[in-house]
């Protein structure tokens, strides 16, 4: 390999240079000599890097920051490192993750909201420009080993299928040589939709055998780092451990939950007071910090229905167990690195939350959070929640805690996740640990910092320049500020002194201690009537005297407020924040949002073996009539069994399957009610076409419809589905042909889900047309020939 000029790393990959010295005719000639091949490595002294990013954890949840949940791993790192008390995120998961990995503001990298809400506007397109290469790519091209374990929520929805493109996938354009985790906003902790690289994989055991995703991720991270240090001990690693916990569903084994039995009986108001007192003891808030007032839209604990309070307590107990369990798995990774002798020279970022605690679980909490995401929270009554209370945290629930607990977990600040205007949505406890590079142990750092500061910090401590070209593309400047200046100087003046915030119209600006903010929308109010942006009421806070944003000075200092409002607008223009977009449900519709769709038209043909297809990879059959037709072959009459096609899972979805020899159509409404329509006769032996027609009632969203089953065009059964999902079946379960991977749609499957006959092709038709036609016989013949 040609020699690399190591003095210039601003162009990546580092260009190879042709050798122009003496070239002999015979390799045995004594004058034959070439420079030795040197493996690519970063500059001497570059440390290992471990970035740990938890999900949906508020500032006041972890014991390391005064919260009620025991997090001994975080406290261990605190004792040996630095605690940053003014570290900020974007108020939402995908934007924070993209900002973290790029060193740029989230609108700069096209992530104005979550990927599923991508629009055609540059700041919300879901597409990271190739002028803003991610940190892992830069590190890999400089000789680091790179690996990610856990959640990737940065892939645009039309790129999540097996055909890619994979530019936004961790192992594609993301720069990670190894990826083991899931793609999307959340996944079931017991039945995850996992990928290794680009390939879907299934866990080798289930929850009945003790499986839990966070533990699985830790296992794989430990295996990888051991192999990395065994095979390339002189090569530093960059590991990104992002478990997806504690995002809903809150799922954890019962023994972890029971540790907190009775701990939250006093409710969320009292919990916030207790938390603030402990935060002052630990020094993670200002000594004169005040507890901010409870917003009027959040009820007091004492005003909650007494019949519901045991359910609310259990919700928080489950969450607490989930967070402690997560910290324990993080500890296992830390211990493994320590056992390898590598922890001393590993820069560890432990970021406890990618935003504030999640208030997406409604005021009463949820047995199935998808009810709220579908705008149907009313189906979960107090009586129902009381009945299923003991299922919270188990594989039988997809639960979330109430808004009140989310607000309490953000103590002492105002508001929660999604509310980028206030510190409750954006301030996350962060710990930095690097014994070799940081002299201070157990010290506090109070300089303002932001998630975009991680990337430039890593580059600085690794001795690497910010690249000017990556893969032939000129790069725009990194927008964050390295935090390394504060490592050994607690009193160093802060260098990141200007930062905008925006999410769903909630917006704010920080400048040299002052903050001007306006809350525009409320996370859990799906049908909220929003004001015009110019009618939003702005607030003004002096951070030097008011650490928690408790005292609004807008009325007293209108000129100061106006100056900061103007500064927000300047920053918004600079970083592609405009136009401000406060739409929620509308942006889930690709046509309205203006983003590409992988599947269009009224027909889709699917083939056996296709699996792990997200809802964005399948025709949308919601709120409309549709037909599913399958060409199958059965061994003998009444012998067929298993799934033909299944979309979704235990907490919402539908399937056409064969149960005890007869076709069945099942529609699972939110894991609460199953509508099952069964044919009244067995499927005859041989090649057959099985069809289910769903005739939607119309008249709005989430209505019901009539179902008719056919064998070879002959009606063999009818039934009714009384209500349907209007928006989403699942955030993690997928569409599978010939089986039902993950958590099955129906509890009524007879035996294994894998179809025991032969499926040639499955066709989906949508719309109000007459779908009584069969699959084109030529299509079946072509598929049959291709499989011979």
Image: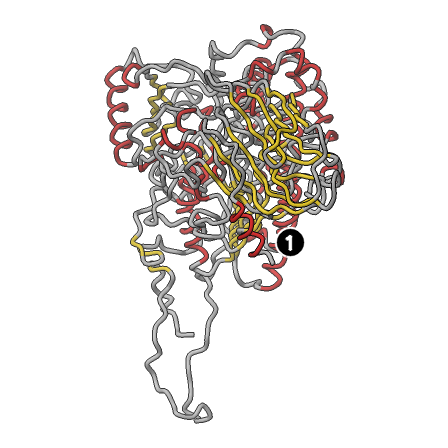
Q: Nearer the viewer, residue 39 or 204?
A: 204
Whether residue 148 can be seen here = yes
Which SS class for mark 1? helix
Q: Residue at x 58, y 53 (%)?
A: 784
Q: Quadrant of residue 656?
A: top right
Rendered image coloring scheme: secondary structure
Q: Nearer the viewer, residue 140 or 408?
A: 140
Question: Pointer 1: what residue?
Answer: 223
* Residue 384: x %, y % from top left: 66, 14
Q: Is residue 591 shown left or right of residue 388?
A: left
* Residue 174: x %, y % from top left: 45, 50
Q: Is residue 785 above or below residue 636?
A: below
Q: Nearer the viewer, residue 236 or 240?
A: 240
Q: Residue at x 35, y 38 (%)?
A: 495
* Residue 477: x %, y % from top left: 31, 47
Q: Quadrant of residue 315?
A: top right
Q: Is residue 163 shown left or right of residue 567?
A: right
Q: Is residue 466 shown left or right of residue 147?
A: left
Q: Residue at x 59, y 13 (%)?
A: 270
Q: Nearer the viewer, residue 307 or 280?
A: 307
């Amino acid at each position: 390999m040609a020699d690399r000029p190591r003095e210039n790393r601003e162009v990546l990959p580092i260009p190879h240079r042709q050798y122009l010295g003496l070239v002999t005719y015979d390799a045995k000639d004594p004058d034959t000599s070439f420079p030795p091949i040197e493996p690519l490595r970063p500059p001497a002294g570059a440390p290992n890097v471990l970035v740990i990013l938890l999900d949906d954890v508020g500032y006041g949840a972890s014991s390391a920051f005064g919260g009620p949940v025991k997090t001994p791993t975080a406290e261990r790192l605190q004792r040996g490192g630095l605690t940053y008390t003014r570290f900020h995120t974007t108020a939402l998961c995908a934007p924070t993750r993209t900002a973290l990995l790029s060193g740029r503001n989230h609108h700069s990298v096209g992530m104005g909201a979550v990927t599923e809400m991508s629009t055609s506007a540059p700041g919300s397109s879901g597409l990271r420009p190739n002028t803003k290469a991610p940190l892992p790519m830069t590190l890999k091209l400089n000789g680091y080993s790179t690996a990610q374990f856990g959640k990737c929520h940065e892939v645009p929805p039309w790129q999540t299928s097996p055909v890619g493109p994979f530019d936004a996938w961790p192992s594609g354009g993301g720069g990670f040589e190894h990826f083991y985790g899931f793609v999307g906003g959340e996944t079931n902790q017991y039945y995850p939709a996992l990928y290794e690289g680009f390939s879907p994989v299934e866990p080798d055991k289930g929850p009945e055998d003790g499986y839990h995703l966070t533990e699985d991720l830790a296992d794989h991270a430990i295996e990888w780092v051991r192999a990395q240090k065994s095979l390339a001990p002189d090569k530093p690693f960059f590991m990104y451990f992002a478990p997806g916990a504690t995002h809903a569903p809150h799922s954890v084994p019962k023994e972890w939950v029971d540790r907190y039995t009775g701990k939250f009986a006093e409710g969320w108001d009292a919990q916030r007071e207790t938390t603030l007192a402990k935060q002052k003891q630990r020094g993670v808030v200002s000594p004169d910090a005040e507890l901010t007032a409870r917003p009027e839209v959040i009820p007091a604990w004492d005003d909650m229905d007494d019949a519901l309070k045991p359910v609310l307590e259990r919700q928080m107990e489950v969450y607490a167990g989930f967070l402690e369990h997560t910290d324990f798995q993080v500890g296992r990774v830390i211990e493994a690195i320590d056992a390898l002798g590598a922890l001393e020279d590993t820069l560890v970022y432990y970021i406890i939350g990618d935003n504030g605690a999640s208030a997406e679980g409604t005021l009463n909490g949820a047995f199935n959070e998808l009810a709220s995401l579908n705008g149907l929270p009313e189906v979960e009554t107090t009586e129902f929640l009381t009945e299923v209370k003991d299922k919270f945290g188990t594989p039988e629930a997809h639960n979330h805690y109430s808004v009140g607990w989310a607000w309490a977990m953000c103590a002492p600040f105002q508001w929660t996740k999604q509310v980028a205007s206030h510190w409750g949505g954006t301030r996350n406890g962060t710990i930095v640990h690097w014994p070799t590079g940081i002299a201070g142990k157990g010290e506090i750092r109070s300089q303002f910092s932001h998630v975009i500061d991680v990337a430039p910090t890593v580059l600085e401590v690794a001795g690497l320049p910010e690249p000017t070209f990556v893969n032939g593309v000129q790069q725009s400047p990194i927008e964050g500020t390295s935090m390394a200046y504060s490592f050994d100087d607690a009193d160093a003046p802060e260098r990141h002194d200007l930062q905008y915030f925006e999410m769903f119209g909630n917006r704010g600006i920080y400048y040299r201690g002052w903050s001007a903010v306006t809350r525009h929308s409320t996370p859990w109010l799906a049908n909220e009537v929003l004001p015009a942006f110019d009618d939003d009421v702005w607030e003004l806070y002096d951070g030097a005297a008011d650490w928690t944003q408790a005292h609004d000075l807008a009325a007293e200092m209108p000129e100061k407020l106006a100056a900061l409002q103007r500064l927000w607008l300047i920053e918004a223009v600079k970083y592609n924040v405009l136009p401000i977009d406060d739409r929620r449900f509308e942006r889930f519709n690709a046509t309205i949002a203006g983003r590409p769709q992988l599947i269009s038209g009224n027909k889709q043909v699917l083939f056996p073996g296709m699996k792990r297809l997200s809802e964005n990879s399948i025709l949308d059959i919601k709120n409309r009539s549709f037909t599913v037709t399958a060409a199958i072959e059965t061994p003998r009459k009444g012998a067929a069994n298993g799934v033909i096609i299944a979309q979704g899972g235990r907490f919402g979805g539908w399937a056409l399957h064969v149960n005890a020899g007869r076709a069945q159509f099942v529609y699972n409404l939110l894991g609460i009610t199953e509508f099952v329509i069964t044919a009244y006769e067995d499927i005859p032996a041989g090649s057959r076409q099985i069809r289910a027609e769903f005739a939607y009632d119309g008249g709005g969203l989430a209505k019901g419809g009539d179902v008719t089953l056919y064998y070879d065009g002959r009606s063999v059964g009818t039934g009714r589905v009384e209500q349907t999902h209007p928006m989403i079946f699942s955030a993690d379960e997928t569409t599978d042909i010939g089986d039902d991977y993950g958590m099955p749609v129906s509890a009524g499957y007879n035996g294994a889900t894998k179809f025991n006959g032969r499926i040639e092709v499955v066709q989906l038709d949508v719309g109000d047309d007459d779908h009584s036609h069969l699959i084109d016989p030529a299509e079946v013949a072509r598929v049959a020939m291709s499989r011979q």
